[in-house]
Amino acid sequence: MQNKNRVSRRSFIKMSMVTAGALLTMPKELLSATGAELKKVVIVGGGVAGATVARYLRKFIPQKAQLEITIIEPKTTYTTPFGTNELLTATRTLEELTFDYKVLEAEIDTEIVHQKATALDNTAKRVTVADGIQYAYDYCIVATGIGFEYSDIEGLDETNNHLVPHAYDLWNDGSTEQISMLKSQLDTMPNDGKVVLVAPKNSYRCPPAPYERASQIAQYIKEDKANATITILDPKSSFAKQDSFEKAWEELYGYKTSNATIILKPETITKKIEILADGKKRLTSYEDETIEADVVTYIPTMKASQFTYEAGLVQSGTAAFDMAQRWCPINHETFESTMAGKESIYVIGDSIRSNLPKSGYAANSEAKACAMAIVSKIQGINPIPQSIITNGCYSFVGKEYAISIFQKFKLEEDKSAYALVPQTRGTSPLEADALWRKKEAEQGHAWYANFRRDCFGV
Ligand SMILES: Cc1cc2nc3c(=O)[nH]c(=O)nc-3n(C[C@H](O)[C@H](O)[C@H](O)COP(=O)(O)OP(=O)(O)OC[C@H]3O[C@@H](n4cnc5c(N)ncnc54)[C@H](O)[C@@H]3O)c2cc1C
C-alpha cells in the first residue's frame, strides 16, 4: 500500500507540473487508490468556477465513497454571462445561453441543492442554506462571483438600477431580465436616440466586456437606428484590447470622425444619475459636465459577492465599503482563504484578490488549480503541482468581426502573485483582413461551446 501510494504521488506530481489538465491523463485508479476515509467538499455557487471545480474534483477522485461533493446554487438554470452582449444584435438568443444542471448532477453523482447559502461556520465546518438545513464539510469552496457597489454614485441603488441596466451579472438584480430590458430600451428609443454606457472602475469582471457591449450597440444602431449614437463614459484612461477595439470602431463605426456612431470619453467619472420625468437620464461627471441620454447602461463598481462579505472572507468586513479591500485574500497557490480562522475555505473565481484577470477563462483555470490543491491535501502530496492559469477572450465587435486575446500566467517564485509567462500573450493582428475577422468570430463561437462544456459538461 505504501509503495502504491508513493508511485501515485510521484506520478501525480510529474503528470501535473504543466497544467491541471495534464492531471487528467493520469490513470484514475492511481488517483483514487489511497483507500482514504470519506471527505466532504461543499461548493457554494454553481457558476463557472463552482461547476468546474466540482467536475474536476470528481474526475480526480471518481468514487463517491471517497469524496462527497455538494453544490449549493439557488438557480435551477445557468445563463452564461459570456455571449449576452450578442443578444443586443439578436446574434444569439437567451435560450441558447441557458441550460439546466442535470448533466453536472449526473457527473458529480449528487443532486445540487437549489438554495441560497446564508451562513458559513468554519468552527463547526458547516454551510447553512436558506431553509435552515446545514451541510457539513471538510473543505468548503466559495465561488459566488461578484457584488455591486452603489455608494460611489448619487441617485442610484438596488431599487432603481434596472432603469439603467448593468445587465452584467445573472445572479444579482435579476439580470437576465436586465439584458432583455436593455434590448427593449434600445428597440423603443428614437432613430436619433442617444445611448450612454458607463464603464466600471478597475478591477472588474471581464475587462473587455463593456467595450464589446458598446460595439454591439453600435452594430445595432448601424442596422436599426441610423442616426443614433453611443457614448462611452470611462473613468479609466485606457482599457483591455484598446488598440484592436479602436481599429474596429474606425473600420465599422466612423470612430473619431464627425459621423461617428461610437464616441469614447476617457477619464470621465460619473458621480450622479437622474431619471427625468420624460424617462430620459441625466448624467453628471466630477467635472460637472452633464449629458442626457435616452438609454443608459451603467456598469457599477464591483466587489466580491455579498456571501463572501457575510462569511468573513473579505478584510474590510461589512461595515463600510473599502475600495482597496473589496476582494477575498487568498493563498495564490492553493486558493485557500488567508483570513484568520478560515482555513479549509477556498475562494475561486471573480471574488478573489489577485492580479489575474477576472474572466470566465481564468475562473475555470483557478478551479482546476484549486481542485488539484485539495486533492493533493487529501492524498498527502507535497509539494503541490504547479498550475498554469490561462486567460482568453473573444470580443464580438461587429457582424462577423471578432478580436481576441490569450495569455498564460504562472506563480511567482515567492508565490505572492502570478506573472505573465513570457511570449504567451497574443492578440489579433491590428491589420488583419475581413476573412481573418470572420474566422475569429467563428472560432469565438466554437470556443464558447467547448469552454461551456469544460465548465458545466453541456
Ligand atoms: C457581458 C459579459 C461578457 C463576458 N465575456 C467573457 C468572455 O468572453 N470570456 C471570459 O472568459 N469571461 C467572460 N465574462 C466573465 C465571466 O462570465 C465571469 O468571469 C465568470 O462567470 C466568473 O465565474 P464565477 O464562478 O466567479 O461567477 P459566476 O459564474 O457568476 O457564478 C457565481 C454563482 O454563485 C451563485 N451564488 C451567488 N451567491 C450565492 C449564495 N449566497 N449561495 C449559493 N450560490 C450563490 C450564483 O447564483 C452564480 O451561479 C463575461 C462577463 C460578462 C458580464
Image (tube, rainbow, N blue to C red):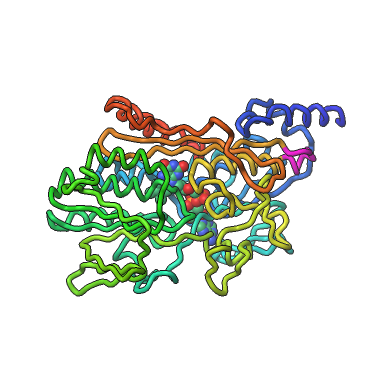
Q: Indicate left or right for 72 with 9 as reference.
A: left
Which residue is painted at 24% across and 45% down in the image? Answer: 255
Decide which of 448, 121 is in the foreground and name it. 448
Q: Position of residue 34 (x, y in %)?
A: 79, 35
Which residue is painted at 27% across and 39% down in the image? Answer: 398
How many numbered badges does the structure rendering display? 0
When the figure is inspected, residue 219 is found, relative to residue 126, above or below; the finding is: above
Decide which of 133, 271 is in the foreground and name it. 271
Q: Position of residue 302 (x, y in %)?
A: 47, 60
Q: Tell me the quarter of the image containing the C terminus.
A: top left
Which residue is painted at 26% across and 71% down in the image? Answer: 275
Q: Is residue 383 magenta?
A: yes
When the figure is inspected, residue 438 is found, relative to residue 67, above or below; the finding is: above
- Classified by dominant secondary structure, the portion drawn in magenta counts as loop
Q: Is residue 61 magenta?
A: no
Q: Position of residue 277 (x, y in %)?
A: 19, 74
Q: Residue furthest right?
A: 2
The stretch in magenta equals 376-384
Q: Position of residue 64 (x, y in %)?
A: 67, 41
Q: Indicate left or right for 220 with 268 as reference.
A: left
Decide which of 244, 150 is in the foreground and name it. 244
Which residue is painted at 75% across and 43% down in the image? Answer: 377
When the figure is inspected, residue 257 is found, relative to residue 400, above or below; the finding is: below
Q: Tell me the quarter of the image containing the N terminus.
A: top right
Decide which of 86, 289 is in the foreground and name it. 289
Q: Indicate left or right for 282 with 84 as reference.
A: left
